[in-house]
């Protein structure tokens, strides 16, 4: 076996496995849901429906205003898959640690005078990194997986980790569209 394949297949560790188990238990998924800010995705839903002139509302209205004032978005777990193969054609790029599929059903208020009802699916791309050694490396990894797995859907990339990052690193990741969820070591 080549050195690349040897390193590729032996990336896991007991600490990584423990973090994956922790974050895919019901309590762990709820922890991710509670800490992830979905407001940018709610704004994306509105702007995308306006751009495509689609009816977003259950009342069959086309929304014209984009200024999101408030929203009620209970996240309901639909399913999740771990070790998701990410391939480009016949080439395996890697394995995303997990993809969580959730329903968002609720209402939002924009500068449009009425309350808008909506229902959509949100995918959360989870990459488990017990220790973050390189922020750039994990950004490239998540962006690659997202572009291949779900280029046209709402997919929120999330790093789950035991590492407490400093405020500048968190801001940098947030600006890249990536959220960080810290789990306690068990």
Image (cartoon, rainbow, N blue to C red):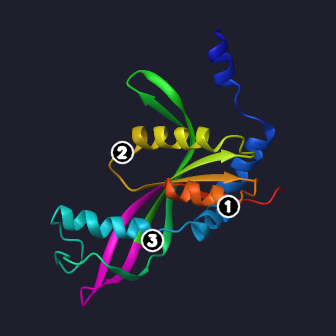
| Mark 2 residue crowding within 10 angstroms, few (<14) / some (14–19) / many (20+) | few
How packed is label 1: few (under 14 Cα within 10 Å), some, or many (20 or more)? some
Quadrant hosting residue 104: bottom left
Provide the major secondary structure of the magenta segment: strand
Name which residue lies at 65% across and 66% down: 31
Labelled pair 3, 2 in contact (Cβ < 8 Å): no
The residue identified by callout 2 is 151
Alpha carbon separation for disc pair 2 and 1: 26 Å
Residue at the farthest front position:
168
Eye-nearest disc, 2 or 1: 2
- For label 3, the SS is helix
Q: Which secondary structure lies at badge 2? A: loop
Question: What's drawn in magenta, residue-wise?
Answer: 105-123
Q: Residue furthest right?
A: 186
Which image quadrant: the C terminus?
bottom right
Q: Secondary structure at mark 1?
A: helix
In the rendered structure, find residue 39 and report the number of the disc placed on it: 3
Q: Residue at x 34, y 64 (%)?
A: 44
Counting from the top left corner in percent of width and height, residue 10 is at 71, 25
Categorize mark 3 by other alpha carbons within 10 Å: few (<14), some (14-19), many (20+).
few
- Mark drawn on residue 87: none
C-beta proximity under 8 Å, tags 2 and 1? no
Residues 166 and 64: in front is 166
Q: Is residue 136 above or below residue 73?
A: above
Mark 1 sits on what residue? 28
Could you tell whether 143 is left or right of 98 in the image? left
The answer to which quarter of the image holds residue 49 is: bottom left
Is residue 21 within the magenta segment? Answer: no
Q: Where residue 145 sits in the image (x, y, percent)?
A: 48, 39
């Amino acid at each position: 076996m080549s050195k690349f394949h040897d390193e590729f297949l032996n990336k896991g560790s007991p600490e990584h496995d423990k973090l994956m188990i922790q974050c895919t238990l019901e309590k762990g998924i709820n922890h991710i849901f509670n800490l992830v800010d979905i407001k940018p995705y709610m704004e994306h839903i509105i702007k995308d429906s306006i751009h495509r002139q689609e009816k977003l509302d259950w009342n069959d209205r086309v929304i014209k205003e984009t200024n999101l004032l408030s929203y009620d978005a209970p996240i309901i777990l639909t399913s999740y898959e771990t070790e998701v193969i990410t391939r480009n054609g016949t080439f395996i790029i890697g394995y995303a640690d997990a993809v969580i599929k959730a329903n968002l059903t609720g209402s939002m208020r924009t500068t449009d005078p009425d309350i808008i009802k909506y229902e959509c699916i949100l995918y959360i791309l989870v990459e488990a990194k017990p220790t973050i050694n390189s922020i750039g490396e994990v950004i490239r990894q998540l962006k690659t997986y997202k572009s291949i797995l779900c280029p046209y859907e709402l997919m929120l990339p999330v790093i789950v980790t035991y590492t407490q990052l400093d405020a500048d690193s968190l801001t940098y990741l947030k600006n890249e569209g990536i959220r960080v969820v810290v789990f306690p070591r068990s």
